[in-house]
Image (cartoon, rainbow, N blue to C red):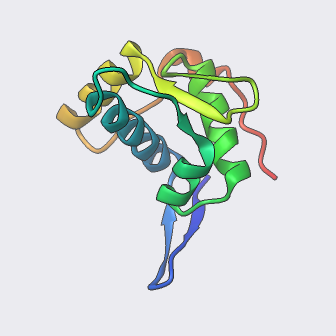
Amino acid sequence: MPVRVKNTRYEAIMSRQELTNKVLQLLAENARNSTSPQVMDSETIARELQISLSETQQLLKVLHASELIVSNLEGKYSLITREGLQWLDQVVFSSNVCHFPKRAAAVSIRQH
């Protein structure tokens, strides 16, 4: 289901897949720009994506269940996994159509 992203210049509809890609890109950039990557807090991710904190934490929990990131139970702090980096690299080289790994299909995303 699309998520409405608010921006001062315009409003755009961003799919869950686009949000997933953007979260993974942020976490990958964080990991690649440091010799000792630190966890990224969900407030920073929410601010970068211009979505609510609760939506961000919900997405982080799904990505954690998919083993693409490691996150604490509340979804406050996250770090991309090797699998997340590999999946993101595959997305870059594939078409615009990408899907969650099979494990994520079993994870239900509850809408608020």
Residue ID at (73%, 30%): 108
Taking 91 as reference, is 54 left or right? right
Relative to 37, say whether 47 is above or below: below
Relative to 12, say whether 19 is above or below: above
Q: Position of residue 7 (x, y in %)?
A: 51, 76
Instruction: Looking at this view, name the residue that lies furthest to the left.
Output: 93
Q: Position of residue 100 (x, y in %)?
A: 48, 28
Q: Position of residue 78 (x, y in %)?
A: 55, 29
Residue ID at (63%, 30%): 62
Instruction: Looking at this view, name the residue that lies furthest to the bottom.
Output: 9
Residue ID at (68%, 41%): 57
Q: Nearer the viewer, residue 7 or 91?
A: 7
Relative to 49, say whether 106 is above or below: above
Relative to 104, say whether 59 is above or below: below
Residue ID at (25%, 27%): 89
Q: Nearer the viewer, residue 98 or 34?
A: 34
Q: Position of residue 92 (x, y in %)?
A: 22, 36
Mark count = 0
